Structure formats: structure tokens, C-alpha cells
């Protein structure tokens, strides 16, 4: 390896076998300047046909997986942040598509950690958000925490493949920017009417002795799923607030006045949460406030407050 002395500009040849990642100190034979020479880090190129998709909702994972496999990509799936980190380091995909509200480690934190590691910093990242309209916010580029792009959940089918082509360098970004967004329209579900049972069957049932009703464990399962849905929505709301107001939120957490500074955002988020979560589930716990408090505590650890 050939290095140059910054003082006298002489060229020095250093044997590669003597170098280490931590660095070896050498003295310039001409001007006696001490040089610290490190072994160059080995750059590992991510696999271009491999993509990791991380989202807590299996339906979203399946939507993205279907699009990618149709285009010939090899897809790795994950449903929480820690598992996503492990798989990304092991598999070294070309792209990570991350839900901002992943359990255990939020998606933007996963992105930040991947970009900080030498072996994974070349992985491209697209964050998925699902609550707010991007056009309502004017945010700084750094608020994406190193992510290369962003997509809203309802835009996946329309824009995801184009965004991937931009990251691969086969399509200019302007083509996507000029493409109009399709409005989100919820299709009404057709009402299915069940035919009335025959009268004979009804008579037989009425004459038969009534047995004790069988246990219904599925009710508890459905209740658990409803609570998890509420927790997921709460995490998504607070994650989106942070995504758009990172610096402001970190300052509020440091100053211990989050609920004062973000009063309007919390009010709006509460309205959205209450509108989507049934009163029965909300009576089981304030999962929105729980998600905010957990987020603040985790962020304090990251900020070392």
C-alpha cells in the first residue's frame, strides 16, 4: 500500500501484511512526521436481487412480497426490528423496505443503525408510513434518518417499483415526482344474505334438547388481536409524528415538555386513534398514551438523558 506524508508529500510504501483495521504508526524517513496508517475496510456489495421487507402487518408484507417476486426479486420477510437487523446483516440485501412503526425497534432506528455499520451502510432503505399525507408536511431531508426514500402505505402498488428502479439507477426520480397520486377509495363490501333454514329443520331443532353451548376460545383470540391492532396503530401514529418532526421532538424530550410542545399533534392523534379503535378495546387500556410514554423512554436512552 502506498501512502503520502501530509507534511513533506513524500510517497511511502507500506507492506499490506503489517496493516490492521485499528492502524499502525509509522515515522516518515524524510521529515519524521508520525503517520497512522489503517488497513482499508473491505467493501461488501449488497446483492442486487435481494430485498428485505419488514412490517408488523402480514397483509402488507404479502402485498409487497407479491410485487417484488413478480419482478424476479428474492424477498426476505420480517415482522419486528431486532429480527430485521439480524437478517439484514446476515443476508446483505440491496434494499430494506421498513415500516416506521416496527415493534421492538422502530423502522427509522433500524435504518439509522444499518447506515452506521460499515458492512450494511450501502443497503438502500425505503420507509413505509401509513397515517398522514406527506404533502401536509414540510420536513428536512435529515428527518428520514438516512433512508433513501419514503412511501405511504396506500401508494405501494402505484409507486413502489418505480422508486426501486430509481434506487437502482434505471429510472430518473422526476418521473415519479410528476406521477399523480391516485385517491384512496374504500370499496364497499357486498352484503351477503343467508337463506332462511327450512321449517322442517327448525322444528327438529326446536324439539331436540338444547345442549350447553361449546366454549368459544376464538373470542379471546379476537380480543387479543384487537388490542394488538390498537397498539400497532398507536405506535404508527407516534412514529409518524417523530418522522416529520424529529429535531423538535428530541428537543421536547430533552426539555421534558413533550406533551406541551406537541399538544396539537397528540390531540389529532388521539382523535384518529379513537376513530379507528372501538370503545370496548379502548376500555382495556390507554394504548395510545402507553405508546407515547414508551417512545419517550426509549428515546431518552438513545439520547442518553
Image (cartoon, rainbow, N blue to C red):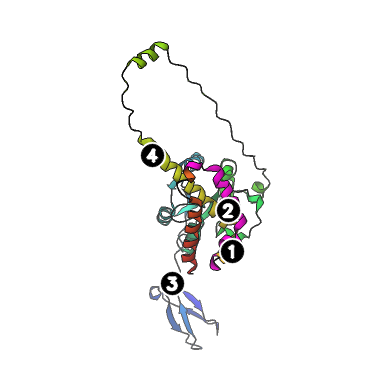
Labels 3 & 4 near each other (Cβ < 8 A)? no
Disc nearest the viewer among 2 and 4: 4
Residue 247 badge: 1
Q: Is residue 72 left or right of residue 149?
A: left
Query: What is the chief secondary structure element of the magenta stretch?
Result: helix
Residue located 46% across and 16% down the image = 196
Residue 39 badge: 3
Residue 209's quadrant in the figure? top left
Residue located 61% across and 36% down the image = 185
Residue 220 badge: 4
Whole-angstrom CA distance, mark 3 to mark 4, is 58 Å
Estimate how packed mark 1 is, as few (under 14), some (14 to 19) or many (20 or more) residues with alpha carbons within 10 Å. some
Mark 3 / mark 1, whichever is N-terminal: 3
Whole-angstrom CA distance, mark 1 to mark 2, is 19 Å
Mark 3 / mark 2, whichever is N-terminal: 3
Disc nearest the viewer among 1 and 4: 4
Disc nearest the viewer among 3 and 2: 2
Magenta stretch: includes residue 273: yes
Point out the stretch of residues depicted in magenta: 253-280
Q: Nearer the viewer, residue 136 or 288?
A: 288
Whole-angstrom CA distance, mark 3 to mark 2, is 33 Å
Estimate how packed mark 4 is, as few (under 14), some (14 to 19) or many (20 or more) residues with alpha carbons within 10 Å. few
Give x and y (percent) for residue 63.
50, 40
Element at badge 2? strand
Element at badge 3? loop
Whole-angstrom CA distance, mark 1 to mark 4, is 41 Å
Mark 2, residue position: 149
Residue located 42% across and 40% down the image = 223
Whole-angstrom CA distance, mark 2 to mark 4, is 39 Å
Labels 3 & 1 near each other (Cβ < 8 A)? no
Query: On screen, 213 above or below 155?
Result: above
Give x and y (percent) for residue 139.
64, 58
Amino acid at each position: 500500500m502506498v501512502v503520502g506524508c501530509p507534511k513533506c508529500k513524500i510517497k511511502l510504501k507500506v507492506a499490506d501484511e503489517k496493516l490492521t483495521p485499528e492502524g499502525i504508526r509509522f515515522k516518515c524517513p524524510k521529515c519524521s512526521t508520525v503517520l497512522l496508517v489503517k488497513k482499508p475496510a473491505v467493501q461488501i456489495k449488497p446483492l442486487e436481487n435481494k430485498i428485505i421487507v419488514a412490517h408488523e402487518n402480514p397483509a402488507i408484507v404479502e402485498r409487497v412480497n407479491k410485487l417484488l417476486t413478480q419482478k424476479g426479486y428474492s424477498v426476505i420477510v420480517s415482522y419486528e426490528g431486532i429480527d430485521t437487523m439480524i437478517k439484514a446483516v446476515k443476508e446483505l440485501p440491496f434494499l430494506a423496505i421498513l415500516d416506521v412503526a416496527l415493534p421492538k425497534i422502530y423502522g427509522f432506528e433500524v435504518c439509522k443503525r444499518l447506515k452506521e455499520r460499515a458492512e450494511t451502510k450501502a443497503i438502500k432503505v425505503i420507509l413505509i408510513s401509513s397515517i398522514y399525507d406527506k404533502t401536509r408536511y414540510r420536513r428536512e431531508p435529515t428527518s428520514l434518518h438516512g433512508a433513501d426514500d419514503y412511501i405511504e402505505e396506500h401508494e405501494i402498488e402505484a409507486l413502489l417499483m418505480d422508486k426501486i428502479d430509481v434506487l437502482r439507477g434505471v429510472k430518473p426520480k422526476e418521473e415519479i415526482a410528476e406521477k399523480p397520486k391516485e385517491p384512496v377509495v374504500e370499496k364497499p363490501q357486498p352484503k351477503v344474505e343467508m337463506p332462511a333454514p327450512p321449517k322442517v329443520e327448525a322444528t327438529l331443532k326446536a324439539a331436540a334438547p338444547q345442549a350447553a353451548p361449546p366454549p368459544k376460545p376464538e373470542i379471546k383470540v379476537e380480543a387479543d388481536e384487537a388490542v394488538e391492532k390498537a397498539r400497532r396503530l398507536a405506535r404508527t401514529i407516534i412514529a409518524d409524528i417523530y418522522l416529520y418532526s424529529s429535531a423538535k421532538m428530541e428537543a421536547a424530550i430533552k426539555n421534558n415538555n413533550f406533551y406541551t410542545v406537541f399538544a396539537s399533534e397528540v390531540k389529532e392523534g388521539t382523535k384518529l386513534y379513537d376513530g379507528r379503535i372501538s370503545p370496548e378495546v379502548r376500555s382495556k387500556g390507554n394504548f395510545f398514551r402507553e405508546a407515547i410514554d414508551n417512545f419517550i423512554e426509549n428515546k431518552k436512552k438513545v439520547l442518553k438523558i
